[in-house]
Image (cartoon, grey):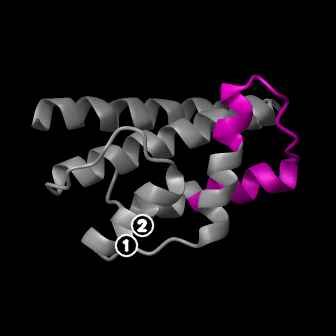
Amino acid sequence: MQEFTANLYSRAKNFLEAAVYNMKGGYYDISAILFSRAVYLALVAKLLDSGVEIPWYLDFAGLFRLLKKKLKIDVESEFSELLDAIRIHDCYSTPIEINEVEIKLLNEKVKDLFVKLNVT
C-alpha cells in the first residue's frame, strides 16, 4: 500500500507543479483542473496512509468530511464546493470561468492544504 500511496503523492505533486506553471502562463482554467486533481490525489493518499477505508466515488465534500472525522483536519466548505464545481465542469467539458485573482486564491488554499497534509 505504501508504494501505491507514494505514487499518488508523486502524481499530486506533479499536478501541483503543472497547475502553478499553467497559472503563471495565464491558463487559469487548465490550472484550476490541475489544482483539483492534485488535491484529490493528495487527499486519497493521506486517508489511505492513515488506514481509512474510502470508497472511490467520493466527491471533495465527502473526502473533506473523512479528513475532519478521522484526522481532525478541518477545511472550509467553500473550498470543497469550489473543487467539486471545477471537477464537474471538467467531467462535462464545460468551460471553467476563473480569473487571475481567483486562481491565485485557489493556489494559496491548495498549498495550505498540502502543508496541513504534510505533503512535501
Vertical order, 83 against 24 (above or below): below
Can you tell which quarter of the image residue 81 is in?
bottom right
Q: CA distance from mark 2 to mark 1?
A: 5 Å
Q: Closer to the camera, 46 or 21?
A: 46
- Determine whether label 2 and label 1 are within 8 Å by CB: yes
Considering the numbered disc 2 on the image, is that residue within a helix, a strand or a loop?
helix
Which residue is denoted by mark 2 in the rendering?
65
Considering the numbered disc 1 on the image, is that residue within a helix, a strand or a loop?
helix
The prevailing secondary structure element of the residues shown in magenta is: helix
Identify which residue is drawn at 45% across, 57% down. 62
Can you tell which quarter of the image residue 77 is in?
bottom right
Vertical order, 102 against 33 (above or below): below
What amino acid type should be assigned to the residue bearing mark 1?
Answer: Lys
Identify which residue is drawn at 66% across, 27% down. 91
What amino acid type should be assigned to the residue bearing mark 2?
Answer: Arg
Can you tell which quarter of the image residue 95 is in?
top right
Which dot marks residue 86?
A: none
Identify which residue is drawn at 69% across, 54% down. 82
Q: Is residue 92 visible?
A: yes
Point out residue 105 in the picture as x, y percentages from the top left corner.
72, 59
Which residue is denoted by mark 1 in the rendering?
68
Point out residue 101 in the picture as x, y percentages from the top left corner.
85, 56
